[in-house]
Image (cartoon, rainbow, N blue to C red):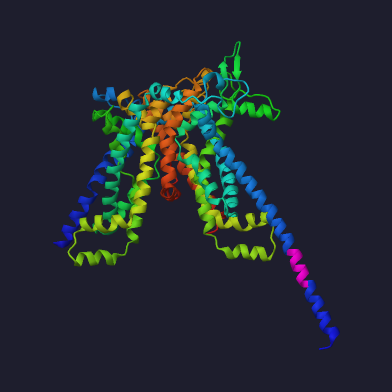
Amino acid sequence: MSRSAYDTIRDSMDKKEQNKQKFSAGYRAAHFFGQAGIYLFLIVMALIVLFPFYWMIISSLKSLPEYKETIPTFWPRQIIWQNYANAFTTANLGVLFKNTLIVGVVSTLLSVFITIITAFAFARLEFKGKETLFAALLATMMIPGELFTITNYSTVISFGWLNTYTVLIVPFLVSVFYIYLLRQNFLQIPNELYLAAKVDGTSDWKYLWKVMVPLALPTLISITILKMMGAWNSYIWPRLVANKEEYQLITNGLRNAFKEAGTGDVDYPLQMAAVTLVSIPLFLVFVFLRKYIMAGVSRSGIKG
Amino acid sequence: MVDSKQQWKAWLYLAPAIVLLLIFTVWPIINTVVLAFTEKYSTLANTGGTSFRIGFGNFTDVVGYSGFLDALKITMILCVATVPISTILALLIAVALNAIKPLRKALQTIFFLPYVTNSIAIGMVFNAMFNMIGKIGIRRPKIQSFGIINDIIRFFGGTEINWINTGSDEWANILVLIIYIVWNALPFKILVLLGGLQSINKQYYDAAKVDAAPRWKVLTRITVPLLSPMIAYVVITGFIGGFKEYTSIVGIFGETMGPPHDAGRLNTIVGMIYDSLENNLVGRASAAALILFGIILIVTLINLQVSKKRVHY
């Protein structure tokens, strides 16, 4: 190869290399600014999403005169913890928390138990009309809950259940969606395991609790949390059937304690303190069990 | 023998669920349909032995009732406004989250927060943010504070708006509701869309990179078509949720379902069902519930039909 030919080739290669570098530097700059724009967008949106929580908390710690100031303060000048104590007594939160906890825990335990045995029957046991029955169950999911509420309201009246814990727990124990979710999970557990257990003489009952339930634990945790959150957030049904104070749940009590709306003469710091107290348990559950909540929610689309 | 024993055992496992479903799900479906077609039904007259005419009386009652068309209007406005806005915002946020690495987990957690809330409780927070403080009435108003949202508007050079107080405009009320519902609907949509994004094959994006396709093109030509099943899903669930809107309005406006000077102005179909139920108009409530079911069914079918043409599976 002659020297000049070699130079030409090397020159052209250098040029190519330079071009490539220029291109990638330009590309990287564009990428950087694009990336910065993305972060800017996300952070602005995150601040908007967070703002109501921020406002709730700082308002709950302000004194009423400070809250009413024409130019708002973004951090309370003087932190008034007393608001929380007052809110607790004004909204009678002690009774409400107790009721909600009783209803939430009992209904969750019973509901999870029923979901487990029903899902097991649909996943592993053989009986006539299994597919038809399951399809019928799924079909009921399409019907809006309001349609059930009308008749259930007169049913529980005729049972004499008004203003009891029973009325808040029993009508919603069976959730077709949770049965569906758990059945899908049970079906993924290999059938060989079941047959092996059969050969060893393990009963269905023992197999269910010793093998299937532990294997489906993540789904069960999701169901438990969503059910608890549902009890915490339920509003319409409790308002209809449990209006006596002894049986009121948290959401109803909260709304009723601060009924006045619109004329602008509300003790907002107190109200915000009560709202914060109701929200904190939800946040705590979320912080510790985020994974399960998000896994459950992404498959449901139903709040609570 | 063994087979019949198996059968018997299966039904034992199913028994609790079946009994509860018969009482609280199957019976209500039958009964509600019957009540909806039983004209002028009342529990009192029923025990007295009166018989009732069967017909469409309750349905014509509902449709003719002045509150129904208003409720339908409010429900429709809320649906038509909130579903597209929240879907597009959620899509942009999900795509943005998918494009970053550092901080993704933290931001994802923040965007999910509104889901883990009590819609009545946070409705009260929105009420506080949009509310004015002081003696507010149509005559001689004495406003002390315009509320934080109005303060922000003033800071950017706008004038205060009466959002939810006495004398407020209906469209101002609706705008507040739209903001709250979108805020509340974002988490679920972001979660589903982000899940969908993460399952898209990276090869498509590599190919786009080779062609140096601009971000916008990548979004509209690759991401949206491949994500269309998830988008269809959040749109359908969004519409279903939208037609059942109720608690967000109670949260902000209280059970009066409207500002103090015009209670019931923001009532929705679900609100109407409960009003009828509380006033012992079971037939009307049943008919309204069936109409709601019909609307949801039709909207879902339309959505499915549209997505059959547009969705890429």
Quadrant of the image occupied by residue B309? bottom right
In this image, B196 relative to B274: left or right?
right
Q: Residue at x 83, y 81 (%)?
A: A7
- x and y percentages locating residue A156 in the rendered image: 27, 31
Compared with B211, A169 (above or below) is above
* Residue A17 falls inside the magenta stretch: yes
On-image quarter of the N terminus of chain B = bottom left
- Residue visible at 22% across and 47% down in the picture: B15
Point 22% across, 51% down: residue: B13
**Is the residue A69 above or below the residue A283 in the image?**
above
Figure check: A44 above or below A58: below
Q: Nearer the viewer, residue A187 or B183?
A: B183
Residue at the extreme top: B140
Residue projecting furthest to the bottom? A1
Q: Could you tell me which residue is drawn at 27 percent across and 65 percent down?
A: A193
Q: Position of residue B3 (x, y in %)?
A: 18, 61
- Spot the residue most to the left: B1
In this orientation, does residue A46 appear?
Answer: yes
The majority secondary structure of the magenta stretch comes to helix
Residue B254 seen: no
Q: Position of residue A53 (x, y in %)?
A: 52, 34
**Closer to the camera, A98 or A161?**
A98
Quadrant position of residue B247:
top left
Q: Which residues are magenta?
A: A16-23
Q: How many marks?
A: 0
Furthest-right residue in this view: A4
Q: Position of residue A109 (x, y in %)?
A: 28, 43
- Does the segment drawn in magenta span residue A1? no
Judging depth in this view, the residue of B65 and B2 nearest the camera is: B2
Does A301 sit left or right of B151 as displayed? left
Q: Nearer the viewer, residue A25 or B77?
A: A25
